[in-house]
Amino acid sequence: MTAAPPPVSPALPTRPVDLAVVGAGIVGLAHAVDAVERGLRVAVVERDARAVGASIRNFGHLCATPQTGTVLDYAMAAREKWLRLSEKAGFDIVRAGTLVVARSAAEMGVLEEFAAERGHEQVRLLDRAGVEKLFPAARNIVGGAHLPLDLRVDPRAAVPALANWLADNGVDFYWHTHAGAISPGIVHTARGDLPATAIVHASGHDVDRLFPALAEEFEVRRCKLHMLEVDPPGDIRIAPAVLTGYSMLRYGGLAATASATEVRREITARAPETLDVVMNLMFTQRPDGAIALGDTHHYSRTHLPFDEESVTDLVLREGARLFGVDQLTVRRRWRGIYADSPTADFLVATPAPSVRVVSVTSGIGMTTALGLAPTVLDDLL
């Protein structure tokens, strides 16, 4: 397939735009969307010809229900916005929810506690037969839960569609344009200065490029993921996203249950090497049928360029066990990467009164950014 030619950027304005956004990933686009809905004149600066980072390297899973606290608030607000934007921008959205499979009594205990806390509207407990209706290939299960409010998109289609919709609604995009510095009222780019009344810097894990002191304050590091697309065993179709016991240790609402401690003990006894690579065994099915399977988590300010095949082997081993097959056939593999902070789920900082630096530092940008952005702009504007 021949790559599309890079889009032609307009000339930089001489008069200030109301809002300049640096970064055309989902966090930057979320701020542009909210600003457009407020009737503001917006410009977006993006160093690449299109979004190629965490915003398109993910599962497309809008995983709202398992969150907690402020994260849950942002996720639920973002959910409503995703539904509206799918109609406006013309991308598909899947309302099949999330299936959490339980393969032990302890894992089922997590789901029972979670259901008791959240209620039937958010969490619907399933027996083995109920799980098999949604995931026919599931093996060695005792039950599960369906989270009907969760959504799914194809990030490789939804993120470009959002950018196109914004452009159709008057947003100027400066693609292939590096922002080398930001000062109050000006984004200094490789093409010249972009004047702006307000500025949002949303470059994800590269926050340290322009704001190293902020990155150090929030202890920002890059989280590297091992992710795969595999053939669907037996050409099965699975509508919901699927989470496992590993996910019960990762998402706040599930991890807060008393039974989660026993789940960790079980996994430690059976496969401690999977915890060493911080596995979150989950998958979604892409429109073409491929299974997006992952993932593991590796943290560093700067990663070496070498990926260990043994880590991929672990994901494939646990994935094959989940599907009840001897092996899975890989179609493609890639390295995901996102900003992570051990001290905060969100980095929102004010280096100058008219400037905000924003990064989702918890790997849930697709889930929360559209809910976070309005709170940032309420304060900034």
Image (tube, rainbow, N blue to C red):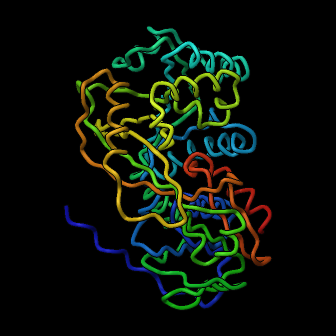
User: What residue lies at 35% left-to-right and 56% top-to-bottom?
Assistant: 307
- 350 and 4: which one is in front? 350
Q: Is residue 170 visible?
A: no
Q: Residue furthest left?
A: 1
User: What residue lies at 48% left-to-right and 62% top-to-bottom?
Assistant: 163
Q: Is residue 270 visible?
A: yes
Picture coordinates of residue 60, whole percent (x, y): 46, 44
Above or below: residue 90 compared with residue 14: above
- The answer to whether residue 288 is left or right of residue 238 is left
Above or below: residue 155 compared with residue 376: above
User: What residue lies at 42% left-to-right and 19% top-to-bottom?
Assistant: 134
Quarter of the image where the C terminus is located: bottom right
Quarter of the image where the N terminus is located: bottom left
- The answer to whether residue 17 is left or right of residue 94 is right
Picture coordinates of residue 370, whole percent (x, y): 62, 52
- The answer to whether residue 42 is left or right of residue 334 is right
- 121 and 328: which one is in front? 328
Picture coordinates of residue 110, whole percent (x, y): 63, 21
